[in-house]
Image: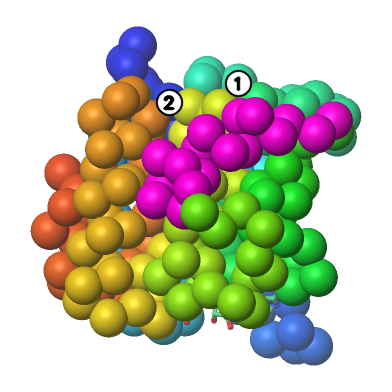
Amino acid sequence: MNDNTILEFQDVWKIYKMGDEEIHALAGVNISIEKDSFTAIMGPSGSGKSTLLHVAGILDMPTKGNVLIKKKKTSDLSQKEQSLLRRKEIGFVFQRLNLLPQLSVLENVMLPMFSPYTRKAKEILKNMGLGDKYNRLPGQLSGGEQQRVAIARALINHPSLILADEPTGELDTNNTKIIMKQLKKLNEQGLTIIIVTHNQIAAEFVNNVIEMRDGNII
Ligand SMILES: Nc1ncnc2c1ncn2[C@@H]1O[C@H](COP(=O)(O)OP(=O)(O)OP(=O)(O)O)[C@@H](O)[C@H]1O
Ligand SMILES: [Mg+2]
């Protein structure tokens, strides 16, 4: 690992036991992600992409192996330290949007914070082209706009690492490009970004592609 490494996996396994069967969702993954890089993880359904992202975001712990975020081994940290590190360094965009339908756009973006961060949330939403839609409910937005709200929410804690699981999942080419251009801009401003994607157009915006098959990198 060099000084510029923000995220490192050292022989990381995630094994699920289902009765007598063992599922190797991650099977000895080694990766090293540089600060300020923009990475796409690609690969077929079930190859372990979401699992990798969840383990990287300390939403899940590996069965074996080490995950290091800014050189800190996540398994050495207490639960409290893990959640502090997660809140300080990581913004997560989930595969299924996870916007709360009964909260407004603005409230959804402020959600990860303890106290209301109205001004900051408004600024981020404005930068995402949603300055006129603060008070809508998610159900009153297009798919692409909802996806931008999910990204805005990942930015509210000013993270250094964004982990986004299929941020352009159900979007058409035009909206895919809008989202990817916005992510690219954030990357150029110094955010390290890892996305999972099946989409060739989305992959053209990144500078590093990781291919997964059967729980490993190929
Ligand atoms: N909680 C769980 N219990 C058991 N098996 C699981 C669990 N979560 C995931 N798996 C299995 O682990 C493997 C990897 O799943 P994962 O969700 O990481 O795939 P993926 O590459 O993100 O797929 P997709 O492109 O469909 O989202 C799959 O075989 C999946 O069935
Ligand atoms: Mg997935």
Position of residue 174 measured from the top left corner of the image (x, y, whole percent): 21, 72
Q: Residues within 10 Å of mark 1 (few under 14, many from 20)?
A: some
User: Is residue 3 among what the camera can see?
Assistant: yes
* Count of numbered labels shown in the rendering: 2
Position of residue 196 measured from the top left corner of the image (x, y, whole percent): 38, 62
Position of residue 37 measured from the top left corner of the image (x, y, whole percent): 27, 34
Whether 94 is drawn above or below 56: the answer is: below
Which residue lies most toward the front here?
A: 132
Element carrying mark 1: strand
Residue sitting nearer the eye, 91 or 28: 91
Extent of the magenta region: 115-131
Q: Residues within 10 Å of mark 2 (few under 14, many from 20)?
A: many
Position of residue 127 measured from the top left corner of the image (x, y, whole percent): 41, 40
- In three-dimensional space, the C-alpha distance between marks 1 and 2, rounded to whole angstroms, equals 10 Å
Q: Identify the residue under disc 1.
A: 72
Element carrying mark 2: strand
Q: Is residue 130 magenta?
A: yes
> Which quadrant would residue 185 be assigned to in this image?
top left
Whether 96 is drawn above or below 204: the answer is: below
User: Is residue 25 among what the camera can see?
Assistant: no
Residue sitting nearer the eye, 215 or 99: 99
Given the image, on which type of amino acid does mark 2 rest?
Ile
The numbered dot on residue 6 is 2
Q: Is residue 187 magenta?
A: no
In the rendered image, which quarter contains the N terminus?
Answer: top left
In the rendered image, which quarter contains the C terminus?
Answer: bottom left
Labels 1 and 2: the sequence-earlier one: 2
Residue sitting nearer the eye, 31 or 176: 176
> Which quadrant would residue 169 be assigned to in this image?
bottom left
Whether 61 is drawn above or below 168: the answer is: above
| Disc 1 within 8 angstroms of ligand 1 (CB) | no
What's the residue at 23%, 50% (across, down)? 181
